[in-house]
Structures are given as structure tokens and as C-alpha cells.
């Protein structure tokens, strides 16, 4: 089989196909023939932080057909369509832990399915499991045009919440109005407090999802309502530390939490996946939360997909597909 390796050499991005042995499905694992894989900003950061001239196997989510099932994998069977978190997704075949796998609804294409796993698990964790977002509450999302940001907007509207989003592009904010965005603030700077307060009648946002990073932390804290919650889910700006107003944290009974699956055990990850299946997939499959996909590339054009993501011009997800999956998507 082939898998695609990326590396930075002489300051340039290179992608090469490598022949590797077919993986073996061990206990509680599924061997999946990959049809499509989502591209995520976190793995691009990993690539850029890797030593130069060191090949890196990217890809952390995929959709495909099960070809082999390891022992203890529950009700999964060969031939089923699945999607989920996995390693080495930019390859002909990938191993997926059974507790990370979800059956693909019949209404979804391979491309749509590949855009779902990571963002759905992240937004379920931060909006429902930890964020407890309720109907009529205000949600603020910094950097809303990202894949996670768009999915958070869609889930929030499904929950009946009102949503404010920031982006450096007014055009992106205008495009997201069709997804239910209540207020777009065109800025990349931490200067949105006054606009948030005006929109919320001086109360502030009940939940804030900070995708940008540390440069926005202080302004996010300022913009929270009494007993507001702040989710830290990314650091695209590269700023990993920031002053914290402890007086506001204490006096306004604020909550600050991180969103990451790295430290979760199998049971905890399974719980989040089951939450997605129960609370999000029906709306996704029914067309109420369709994945917003910016562009689709073939595996051979992975370098172009990465370049697009680093340009910060996309809205929603970037998906990479095998040629046959791409042709099927075009014909659908």
C-alpha cells in the first residue's frame, strides 16, 4: 500500500508517496480502506515544528470501508462504512480504534464523512459536555471561519443559541450569515469587547470558544457574562501564555477549560464519540448541519491542500480523497 509523507526541505514543502506493508488489525482495531481524509491545522503545526528534512506521516481522521476487524471490536463488520479519528490517514489503508469509529449515515458522501470526525468530537466536547451551551445563550467564537469554528456555529444554532464570530475577513463573515451567524465582527485584533457587550445588552457572552490563542485570552475574559465559560481549543497565533485577570475570574464566577483529547482514555473518548452519534449525527445526516467543505483535493495534490490551509483563505474543511472517491463526489 501507499502512504503520503510530508517534509520541509530547503524551506519548501514536499510530499512523497511511500510503499509500506499493509497494517494488521489488532485487538479493538479496524483496518479501513481510506476513501477520504480531513486536513486539520493542528497537524500542519506539527509538520512545521518537526526537524527539517524529516518525513512526517500526517492525517488524523478518515472515512472508508472496513476490510478487517480485530478481536473485541464490538458490532463492527467488514464492508461497513465508517469515519473516525485515526493515525496516518493519508494512505491507502489506516487503522482505526473501534472506540473512535462511527458508522457513516447513508445520506453522507465519503467527502462529507471525512470532514466530520475531529470537528464533531471537538465541538461536542466544548459546547455540550463541558460548555453546557443552552438555548438563547450567547456564544462567541474567535476565528469562526475555521473547520471547528463553522461546526461550532452550526451546533450552536441547532441548540437554539445566538452566535457572534470574529474573523479578519468580512467576506467570510458575510458567507457565514447563511449558516445562522447572528453577528460578525471583522477583526483579527483583541478589540471585540464593546461589540459583544452591545449585542448582548451589556451582559457578555455565556460561552466563548477561543480558537485563535493567547493573544485573545484577556479580551475573551473581559467579554464573558457572569458565570461565563471560556473554552481554549487552539493557538493558531502561536501565543501559548497570557496574563489572566484573577479578579474577574473570581468575582464573576468564570470557568476556563481546555479542549483536547490527548489525555483521554478509551472509555472517555468513547463517551464523546457516543455523544456525537446521539446528539449531532441525526442533525448532520438529516441536512440540518451539513459539513461545510471549502475544497477537495486528491491525495496526489496534498501539498496544494496544505498550502491552501496555510493561506487562511478557506471557510470550513479541506478534504483529501482518493481519485475514485473524488470522481464519485463530483458525480453526486
Image (cartoon, helix red, strand yellow):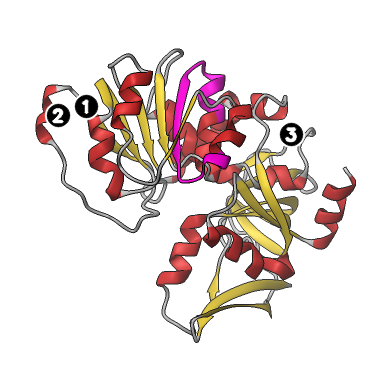
Image position of 314 with respect to 120: above or below: below
- Mark 1 and mark 3 in contact? Answer it, CB < 8 Å: no
Q: Residue 228, image x and y in percent?
A: 28, 24
Dot 1 alpha-carbon crowd within 10 angstroms: few under 14, some 14 to 19, many 20 or more = some
Q: Residue furthest right?
A: 331
Q: Position of residue 206 (x, y in %)?
A: 33, 22
Label 2 SS: helix
Q: Which residue is mark 1?
A: 254
Q: Which residues are magenta?
A: 154-172
Q: Nearer the viewer, residue 204 or 159?
A: 204
Q: Earlier in the sequence, mark 3 or mark 2?
A: 3
Q: Which numbered tag is attached to residue 105?
A: 3
Residue 151 picture location, percent across and down: 55, 35
Q: Mark 1 near mark 2, Cβ–Cβ under 8 Å?
A: yes
Left or right of 240, for residue 263: right
Label 3 or label 2, whichever lies nearer to me, is: 2
* Labels 1 and 3: the sequence-earlier one: 3
Amino acid at each position: 500500500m501507499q502512504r503520503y509523507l510530508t517534509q520541509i526541505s530547503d524551506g519548501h514543502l514536499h510530499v512523497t508517496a511511500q510503499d509500506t506493508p499493509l497494517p494488521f488489525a489488532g485487538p479493538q482495531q479496524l483496518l479501513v480502506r481510506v476513501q477520504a481524509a480531513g486536513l486539520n491545522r493542528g497537524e500542519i503545526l506539527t509538520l512545521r515544528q518537526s526537524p527539517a528534512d524529516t518525513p512526517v506521516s500526517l492525517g488524523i481522521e478518515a472515512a472508508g470501508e472496513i476490510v478487517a476487524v480485530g478481536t473485541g471490536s464490538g458490532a463492527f463488520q467488514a464492508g461497513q462504512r465508517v469515519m473516525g479519528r485515526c493515525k496516518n490517514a493519508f494512505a491507502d489503508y489506516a487503522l482505526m480504534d473501534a472506540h473512535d469509529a462511527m458508522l457513516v449515515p447513508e445520506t453522507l458522501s465519503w467527502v462529507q464523512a471525512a470532514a466530520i470526525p475531529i470537528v464533531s468530537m471537538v465541538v461536542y466536547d466544548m459546547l455540550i459536555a463541558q460548555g453546557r451551551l443552552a438555548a438563547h445563550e450567547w456564544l462567541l467564537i474567535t476565528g469562526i471561519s475555521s473547520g471547528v469554528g463553522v461546526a461550532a456555529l452550526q451546533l450552536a444554532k441547532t441548540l437554539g443559541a445566538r452566535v457572534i464570530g470574529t474573523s479578519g475577513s468580512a467576506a467570510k463573515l458575510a458567507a457565514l450569515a447563511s449558516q445562522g451567524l447572528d453577528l460578525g465582527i471583522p477583526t483579527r485584533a483583541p478589540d471585540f469587547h464593546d461589540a459583544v457587550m452591545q449585542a448582548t445588552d451589556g451582559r457578555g457572552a455565556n460561552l466563548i470558544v477561543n480558537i485563535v490563542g493567547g493573544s485573545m485570552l484577556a479580551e475573551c475574559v473581559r467579554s464573558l457574562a457572569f458565570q461565563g465559560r471560556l473554552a481554549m481549543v487552539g493557538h493558531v497565533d502561536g501565543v501559548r501564555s497570557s496574563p489572566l485577570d484573577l479578579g474577574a475570574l473570581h468575582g464573576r464566577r468564570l470557568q476556563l477549560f481546555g479542549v483536547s483529547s490527548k489525555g483521554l482514555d478509551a472509555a472517555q473518548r468513547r463517551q464523546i464519540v457516543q455523544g456525537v452519534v446521539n446528539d449531532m449525527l441525526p442533525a448532520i445526516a438529516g441536512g440540518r448541519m451539513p459539513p461545510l467543505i471549502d475544497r477537495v483535493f486528491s491525495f496526489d495534490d496534498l501539498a496544494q491542500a496544505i498550502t491552501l490551509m496555510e493561506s487562511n483563505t478557506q471557510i470550513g474543511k479541506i478534504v483529501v480523497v482518493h481519485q475514485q472517491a473524488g470522481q464519485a463526489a463530483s458525480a453526486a
